[in-house]
Amino acid sequence: MEGIAGTLDRSNALDERRAERGNEILSKVEALADKKKFSEQIGHAENEVKGKESLRDKHKKKEEAKLWDACIQAESIFVGQMLKQMRSTVHKGDFINGGQTEEIFQDMLYDEYATNMSKTANFGVAKSMYDQMSKLL
């Protein structure tokens, strides 16, 4: 009978070691799960930070776009003045004269020319103004 009792003792000891080993494995799994939860929390926090940075970047891009538009408008005023001075050097004949209405139309037309020229041509005035003022943003 001692053989059976010894076998039972060894079997119980083996079961206890298996149980301990199982508990060790469970604790490691729980630790890994905690690490996963922690890494997920870090990931969520990083996404929130990125979201705030992207909002900041979007705001800065809007401000830069507004500044560029303002610089283009300022350059168009300069170009408009240049075109008006050039137009004043051309002598008008008395044969066809539209009077004050023609002058108003020509002013509006030349303002539109100036705006289109500032947007498409590379005079450099708007870029210089933008480069200087964008340092302040």
Image: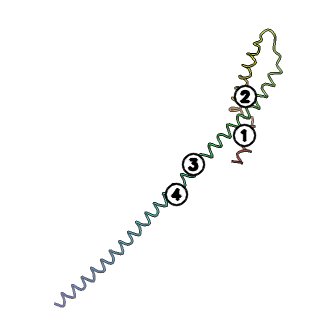
- At 81% from the left and 10% from the top, the residue drawn is 94
Q: Earlier in the sequence, mark 1 or mark 3?
A: 3
Q: In this view, does 94 lie to the left or right of 31?
A: right
Separation of marks 1 and 4 at Cα, in angstroms: 36 Å
Examine the image and state in which quarter residue 78 appears: top right
Q: Are marks 1 and 3 in contact (CB under 8 Å)?
A: no
- Check contact, mark 1 vs mark 4: CB within 8 A: no
User: In 3D space, how far apart are the residues under numbered discs 2 and 4 (Cα atoms)?
Assistant: 48 Å
Return the residue at label 1.
127
What residue would you read off at disc 3?
55
Residue positioned 75% across, 31% down in the render? 77
Residue type, mark 4 in image: Glu
Find the residue positioned furthest to the top: 95
Discs 4, 3 touching: Cβ within 8 Å: no
Q: Position of residue 105 (x, y in %)?
A: 72, 19
Contact between labelled residues 4 and 2, with CB atoms less than 8 Å apart: no
Where disc 4 sits, the SS reads helix
Mark 2 or mark 3, which is nearer the start of the sequence?
3
Q: Which of 104 and 40 is in front in this view?
A: 104
Q: Name the residue under label 4.
A: 46
Q: Badge 4: few (under 14), some or many (20 or more) residues near its Cα, within 10 Å?
A: few
- Disc 1 marks a residue whose amino acid type is Lys
Mark 1 or mark 4, earlier in chain = 4
Secondary structure of the residue carrying numbered label 2: helix
Would you call the spot at circle 3 few (<14 residues within 10 Å), some (14-19), or many (20 or more)? few
